[in-house]
């Protein structure tokens, strides 16, 4: 009776296959873990704006919620007058005038920490009666709208 050859894969091929499978599994695990540990940079904060008052040629509003507090330089502000851009998207800064279309926007950082936090206020001056205004905050990293508020004239 003849004996069947019961040889398996050669030891060299088996070793190469085991190393290749290990490398592939390690790469897959690395990608999964990195995505869990590193939060995406483009996630915009939650911000709620509230119109406080409008008198003559000036309107004021405030930030009622800002979670998490983020650096003001990560935001842009744009102002629309009757759905037309009056102030184009401009990086937000505390205590600086942002102008355009006869309007002036000024953000006041109440805590002085340089972050957008609840309680901060802003003022829009130069408004004209009969024109509707909208102040829009944009997340600079993605250009997405974070929040907006309408300011009646």
Image (cartoon, rainbow, N blue to C red):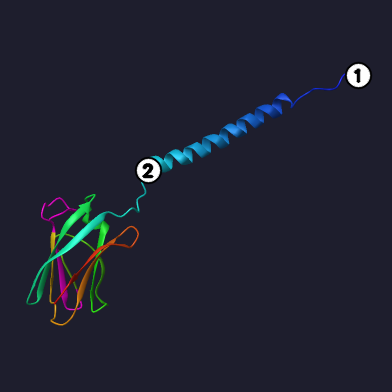
Q: Residue at x 74, y 26 (%)?
A: 10
Snapshot quadrant of residue 5 = top right
Q: Circle 2 is placed at which residue position?
A: 38
Which residue is outermost to the left? 55
Q: Position of residue 21 (x, y in %)?
A: 60, 33
The secondary structure type at the circle numbered 2 is loop
Q: Residue at x 35, y 50 (%)?
A: 41
Q: CA distance from mark 1 to mark 2?
A: 62 Å
Which residue is outermost to the bottom? 130
Q: Position of residue 51 (x, y in %)?
A: 14, 66
Residue 6 counted in the magenta span = no
Query: Taking 49 as reference, is 80 above or below it?
Result: below
Snapshot quadrant of residue 100 = bottom left
Q: Is residue 7 left or right of residue 112?
A: right
Q: Position of residue 34 (x, y in %)?
A: 42, 40
Q: Which residues are magenta?
A: 100-120
Q: Residue at x 70, y 29 (%)?
A: 13
Which residue is outermost to the right? 1
Query: Taking 6 as reference, is 47 above or below it?
Result: below
Q: Indicate the quadrant containing the N terminus: top left, top right, bottom left or bottom right.
A: top right
Q: Nearer the viewer, residue 90 or 81?
A: 81
Query: Taking 91 as reference, is 36 above or below it?
Result: above
Q: Position of residue 113 (x, y in %)?
A: 15, 50
- Asked if the residues shown at circle 1 and circle 2 are in contact, with their CB atoms under 8 angstroms apart, the answer is no
Q: Circle 1 is placed at which residue position?
A: 2
Depth check, mark 1 against mark 2: the one in front is 1
Query: Taking 11 as reference, is 41 above or below it?
Result: below
The secondary structure type at the circle numbered 1 is loop
Closer to the N terminus: mark 1 or mark 2?
A: 1
Q: Is residue 12 left or right of residue 123?
A: right
* Disc 2 packing (10 Å; few <14; some 14–19; many ≥20): few
């Amino acid at each position: 009776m003849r004996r069947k050859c019961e040889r398996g894969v050669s030891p060299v091929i088996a070793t190469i296959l085991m190393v290749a499978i290990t490398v592939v599994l390690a790469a897959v695990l690395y990608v999964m873990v990195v995505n869990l540990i590193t939060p995406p940079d483009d996630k915009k904060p939650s911000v709620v704006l509230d119109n406080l008052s409008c008198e003559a040629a000036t309107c004021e509003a405030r930030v009622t919620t800002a979670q998490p507090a983020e650096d003001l330089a990560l935001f842009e502000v744009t102002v629309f007058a009757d759905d037309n851009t009056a102030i184009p998207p401009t990086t937000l800064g505390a205590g600086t005038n942002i102008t355009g279309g006869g309007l002036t926007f000024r953000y006041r950082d109440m805590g002085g920490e340089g972050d957008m936090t609840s309680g901060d206020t802003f003022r829009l001056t130069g408004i004209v009666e009969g024109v509707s205004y909208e102040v829009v905050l944009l997340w600079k990293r993605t250009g997405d709208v974070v929040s907006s508020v309408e300011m009646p004239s």
